[in-house]
Image (cartoon, rainbow, N blue to C red):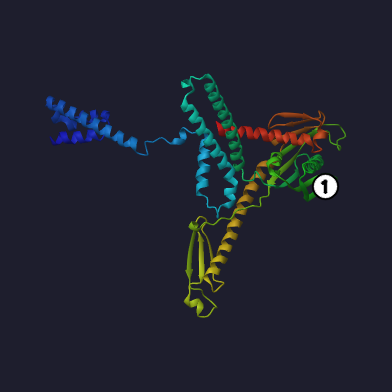
Amino acid sequence: MIMGSAICWRAIKCSSFKMKEILGMKTMCVQVRNYPRFYTTLSRVCLTSCSNYYRHYKTCDNNSHYATKPSHEKQSNLELQMTRFLDEFKTLDPVVNSVRIKQIRPIVSLIQSIDQVKSDMKSLEEMGTDKIEDKEMKSLCEEEIKTYQDELVNLEHKLATAIIQDEDQFEHCTEVMMEISAGVGGQEAMLFAQEVYEMYIGYGQQRGLDCQTVVFSTSEMGGLRQATLNLSGPDCFSYLKYEGGVHRVQRVPKTERSGRLHTSTVSVAVLPQPKDIEVAVAEKDLKIETKRASGAGGQHVNKTDSAVRMTHIPTGIVVECQEDRSQIKNRSIAMDKLKRLLYEAQFEEQETKCKIKRKVQVGRKTRNEKIRTYNYPQDRITDHRIHKTLYSVAEFMSGGSALHELIDEIRTHDYAFRIDQLLS
């Protein structure tokens, strides 16, 4: 009987397939198999016990959080983003995170509008247009639902655009540093670099941007080795960032006597110059310790804990201050020091991101990395990112409406692709 209990317990703790395997083991079941009736009874008991245990296990498992499928599997990418922004907005401190609150408040307002429209639509749909006998009332109800559907599509598109803009923290940067450098092609590349520089000067003037030349290095034979421009204006980076990359020119150089067609390159790097770096220090992120100050100060420093040691837990930055006899003043000075160090850390982080952007845009300045080709013999400009071809190179190089319209079209394509990814 002890043998039967052991087998039964093992059967309960495993699957029915494994249980049968246990019951069939010669070494463990040799005594049981000599008594067929007991074997049959034991099998029935084991199967019943195992079945009950399995049923109980599944019930418990279904009620546990491990058995629950993540809700985001049924949500769209946009719904996930909506949840993320609402959760973030709830956790932000109005004093500490005022800049971030200002940034995402329009997004939260759009989310609330979407929720309201969905709620109104649900109320109408629950009424059931099929149950309405009055034709006029039924028609009005259907029109109202259609209006809500159109409004929902419009709001979701606006929300997707706002989320995309928020993803790029430099999107609304109003100051840009543009670097123009001659690439492959020697003197011809330098001559074209100067023309590209003049094109962006013209673009900035026609768009009302403030343009300042910081670096302008020319070659002995004419042409531009390298130039650095500072441009500032509303949404400056949002448009000019699409000009970063390798620009390829195909033409017969002025220095070429045999009339051969040359291919040269110029690299353009567009780097944002952010200013509004938020330094937020929450009380929960601080560990503040006080101690007796050392050094000059008389008996006062030996009697009071005026020295302050402040640790920023997330970054591990530690500052100390015992400059004043007052603990309150020392705490204020320590906080200023900590904020300055955090600002420097954030500034270095943004500088690193800008350097990465520059490396991606400039590349190796080779001909096969081009984003745009300027073909002078055919009077043609081709943007390889959207496979767009324009004509009249001279007009385009003036930096007028043709250049802005192309940039705007590239920007539209980029936004459309990213919005489609978000709404899918």
Is residue 61 in view?
yes
Which residue in the structure is indicated by mark 1? 219
- Residue 119 image offset from top left, x and y in percent: 50, 34
| Position above or below: 53 against 169 | above
In the image shown, does 101 or 324 lie closer to the viewer?
101
Q: Amino acid at mark 1?
A: Ser
Relative placement, left or right, of 352 versus 375 is left
- Dividing the image into 4 quarters, which one contains the C terminus? top right
Q: How many marks?
A: 1
| Nearer-the-camera pick, 214 or 279 | 279
- Residue at x-position 58% and y-position 31%: 151
Percent of width and height locating residue 69: 41, 35
Front in this rendered view, residue 211 or 104: 104
346 relative position to 299: left or right: right
Where on the picture, by quarter, is residue 11? top left
Image quadrant holding the N terminus, namely top left
Residue 227's x, y, as percent?
A: 77, 47
Badge 1, how many Cα within 10 Å: few under 14, some, many 20+?
Answer: few
The secondary element bearing badge 1 is classed as: loop
Q: Quadrant of residue 42?
A: top left
The image shows residue 370, relative to residue 129, as above or below, that is: below
